[in-house]
Image (cartoon, rainbow, N blue to C red):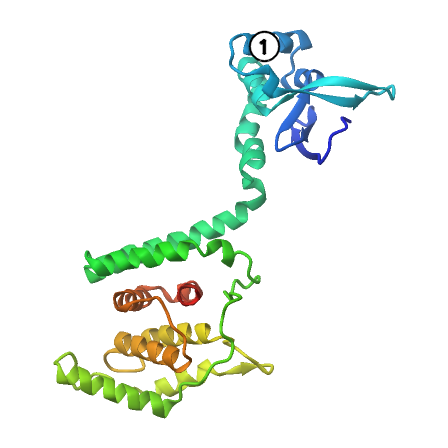
Amino acid sequence: MEQMNNKELVLFTLPDGNVTIDVQLNNENVWLSLNQLSTLFDRDKSVISRHLKNIFLENELDKNSVVAIFATTASDGKRYQVEYYNLDAILSVGYRVNSKQATKFRQWANKVLKDYILKGYALNNNILDTTHKEYQQLLDLLNNTLISNQQVTAQGQNILALINDYATTWSALLQYDEDRLAIPNTIHKNSLSLDYVTSISAITEFKNSLLAIGEATALFANERNEQLQSILANLDQTMFGEELYQSVEEKAANLLYMVIKDHPFSDGNKRIGSFLFVLYLQLNKLTTNVNNIGLTSLALLVAESDPAQKDLIIRLIINLLVK
């Protein structure tokens, strides 16, 4: 048909299948000839021409901006210079023409064609839907956390900051593997293990310091069924010779999550989980921009989250650790 560079086809077909138009894409716009407009709207070319003339006379559109000349090969094999009208002109004519086909085209164009060309929704719709749903999960979780913990001051504001910081990572997350496991390029793959004896010793010192200032009871940090040992072992587990958690950031995120959610202690799991999280980062000489209030907010966010959101929360923690 017309000789255009970088052209694509968007097919418009009426429900009855009687009319099909090959809509030409060029320079991020669509173009139809007068003959095609006549077929599209089921009106004579003279009617279409009259509408176009009035559109330009009334300064609804600038003719120089919506009309282009393209070389077109006719059925006789000869090439002709033909005027083509872009999407703005097509829609303007469509809103003036009184026909069933014009109505059908307006509905189709408004819902599909313009979004496809100008916004790319048709191409990226699945990605956008996924992103929106995951971000909405975080916002819902944020709301529940603030209500449950009556946070209206610095901590509540800090959670908002965490969510906003995380929102900026979605474009990067979309580039990861199909399982959507967040593994940024800047992660630290070599890690030192936090062993059980060291952990228990550190937790004991932590408990004593809290008891001394009246911020813990005898129930604090009493381990249940050696669950902490199991959690620490899980951080270093392998599969087919490869570590399941392949970075310091991923192990730290899972450590925080598992201690808080699995409740290995009779009391103080959020505080102990946060303490071990920081201890593990220090052991591996990894600094973080998450401050004290931020860590408190993050621990509460993990505690309030639904288990089904685990992957989402782990990605959040990892991306907060990655600079």
Compare residues 29 and 138 and report the one nearer the observer. Answer: 29
At horizontal 69% and vertical 34% (from top left) the residue drawn is: 9
Q: Name the residue: 63% across, 17% down.
A: 41
Residue 108 image position (x, y, % from top left): 57, 29
In the rendered image, residue 320, in percent from the top left (x then y), is placed at: 39, 64
Residue shown at 34% from the left, 64% from the top: 305
* Residue at x 66%, y 25% (from the top left corner): 31
Nearest the eye: 232 or 288: 288
| Lateral position of residue 153 relative to residue 189, left or right | left
| x and y percentages locating residue 92 in the rendered image | 55, 18
The quadrant where residue 99 appears: top right
Q: In which quarter of the image is residue 323?
A: bottom left
User: Left or right: where does residue 278 sit relative to residue 97?
Assistant: left
> Tag 1: Cα neighbours inside 10 Å, few (<14), some, or many (≥20)?
some
Q: Which amino acid does label 1 sit on?
A: His
Specify the quadrant of the image occupied by residue 114. Answer: top right
Image quarter (top left, top right, bottom left or bottom right) of the N terminus:
top right
- Element carrying mark 1: helix
**Where residue 217 appears, x then y in whole percent?**
15, 83
- Which of the two residues, 24 or 278, is positioned nearer the viewer here? 278
Q: Number of callouts in the render?
A: 1
Q: Height in image: 240 above or below 293?
A: below
Q: Residue lying at the far left in this picture: please name it.
A: 214
Q: Is residue 225 visible?
A: no
| Residue 154 appears anywhere in the view | yes
Residue at the disc numbered 1: 51
